Image (tube, grey):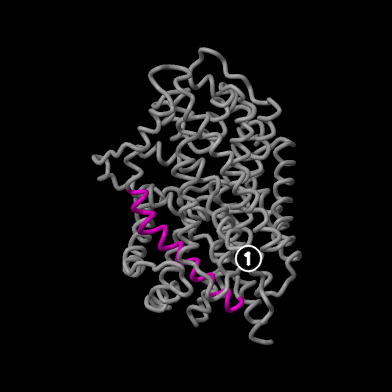
Amino acid sequence: MTSRQRWGTRVGLILAMAGNAVGLGNFLRFPVQAASNGGGAFMIPYFISFLLLGIPLMWVEWTIGRYGGTRGHGSTPGMFQALWEHPVAKYLGVIGVVGPLLIVVYYTYVESWTLAFSLFALAGKFPQPPEGAGVASVLAPYKKLFADFIGAGGSTWMRPSLWAYLFFLITLGLNVWVLSRGISRGIEALAKVAMPTLFLFAVLLAIRVLTLGHPVSPAYGPWEAMNFLWKPQLEKLGDWKIWLAAAGQIFFTLSVGMGAIHTYASYLKEKDDIALSGLATAATNEFAEVVLGASIAIPAAVAFFGLTAAQEIARSGAFSLGFFSMPAALTMMPLGRLFGFLWFGLLFFAGITSSVALSQPAVAFLEDELKWTRKRSAYTVGAFIFLSAHLPIFLSGALDELDFWLGTFGIVLFALVETVIFIWIFGADRAFQEMLKGADIQIPRFFYYVLKYVTPVMLMAIMLGWFATGWLDTIRKANTVIWITRGYILLVIVLGLFMIRRAFAKKEAS
C-alpha cells in the first residue's frame, strides 16, 4: 500500500477541521436563523441539537474517516465498503464525493463575491446611504450594487459583470493551488494563516459593533439585539418548526453529512486521538458562530435599523443581511471602509477554508482509488468546478436548486445512511470501541445510546419535518432551469457511480 499523506501537526489538523466547519453559514446563515426563529427561543433547541446530533455525528465521521484512512481510503466509497462488505456499500458512498463537489460548484462562486466586496469596501466603492430615509431606501443602493454585480434581474438568464466572473476565476485558482500543494503544505498551511486571521477580524468587528451605543435612536442599539438573541423564551419551545430550524442549522454549522470530515480524518494514524480533537473542533466552531457570529450582523442591523426591521431583513435571507444591511451599517460607522474590508475579508477566509475542504473528498478519491497524482487530481477537480459553475453563474435559480438538493436534503440523507452503516451494520459496540482508540478523553457512555437510538430518530424526524413543512412543494416545482439543474445533478451522480465501479473493478483485477 502506498504511503498516504499525513497532517504535519495536531494544531494544524484542528485548525483545518475547524476551517471546514467555520464557513459562511456561521456569520450569515446562523444570524438569519436565530433572528427569524425567535432569538432566545431558538438557542435552547440549538444547543440540545448540538449535544444530541452535532457532537455524535462529528465523532462518527472522524471515526469512519480514520478507520477508512488506515485501510488506504480517503473518501466514503472505500470507507463504506471497509465498514460493510456488501457490493452496494461503495455505491452508497457516492453521496460523500459527489455531494460536497456539487456544493463547491456554487459555494466557490458565492465565496468569490466576498473577495470582491472586501476590495470594493477598501476602495470606497460602496454607496453612501441617503440621510433621513427609511430602511428600504437605505438598502436600495446596496441591493442594486449586488444585483448589478451578479447580473440578477432576469427571469432565466443571469448577466454577471466582468468583475464577478474575474473574481470567480481568481477564487477558483486559489482553491486549486491550495489543493495541489497537498495536505500539510497546502490545506494545513492555509488553515494556519486563514483561521487566526478570521478570528482576529471577527473579534475586531464584534468589539466595534457592540460599542456602537445608540447611533440612530435611543430606542435601539446592539445590546437590545443581544438581549433578544439570548433571553430564553420558554413559551415558544412548543413550536416544532423552531426545533426543526435549530437541528438544520447544526448540520450547516458543523459541516456534517458532507464527506469532508471523513476525508480530513483519513490522514490520521490508527491510534491518533479523535475524541478530544473532534470536540475541540466543534467547540471552536461554536465559539465562531454563537459568540462571534451572533455579535456582528444582527446587532449592527438592530443598532441602525431597529429590532423589527432587523428581523425583517433576516427573514429575507442571508444575502440581504450580509450584502445589504451590513455594508449599509458599516458605511455609516467611522472607519467604515476598514470595517467593511474586515467583514468581507472575514467571510472570504471562512469561505475558502470550507471550499477547499469540500473539494478534498473528490481529490482523495482520484488519488486513492484511481492512483492519480496529487496535481492531476486537483487540476481535474478544478476543471470540473469551473465548467459546472457556469450553471449558477448564468442560470437564475440554479444556485438555489443546487443548494436544496446538495446542501439541505443531501446532507441529512447522507448522515442517515452513514449512521445506519456505522452503528447498525458495522455494530454499535465495535463503533464505540473504534471511537475510543487512542482517545485523550473518555467519551461518556451516554453517547453510545444517543448514537444508537436518539441520533437516527432525530435524522428521520428532520427529513419528515422538512417534507411536512412544504419541502414537497419545493420538489414539485418545475421550470426549465430547475429541470436542467436536476438533470445535471443526476448526470454527475451517474458519472460518480461509473467512476466508483471502474476504480474498484481495477483494484480487484490487479
Q: Which residue extends farthest top? A: 132
Q: Which residue extends farthest bottom? A: 509
Q: Which residue is mark 1?
A: 7
Quarter of the N terminus within the rendering: bottom right
Q: Which residue extends farthest front? A: 440
Which residue occupies the foreground of this view, 432 or 171?
A: 432
Using the rendered view, name the quadrant where residue 222 is placed. top left
* Relative to 219, residue 464 above or below: below
Where in the figure is residue 331, as x and y percent of width and height?
59, 24
Using the rendered view, name the quadrant where residue 186 is placed. bottom right
Whether residue 59 sits left or right of residue 109 in the image: it is: left
Q: Residue at x 40, y 36 (%)?
A: 35
Where in the figure is residue 39, as x and y percent of width and height?
36, 37
Where in the figure is residue 137, as x and y percent of width and height?
53, 19
* Relative to 100, residue 430 above or below: below
Which residue occupies the foreground of this view, 234 or 215?
A: 215
Looking at the magenta stretch, what is its main secondary structure? Answer: helix
What residue span does the magenta drawing correspond to?
45-72
Look at label 1 and name its amino acid.
Answer: Trp
Whether residue 340 sits left or right of residue 252 in the image: it is: right
Count the numbered circles shown: 1
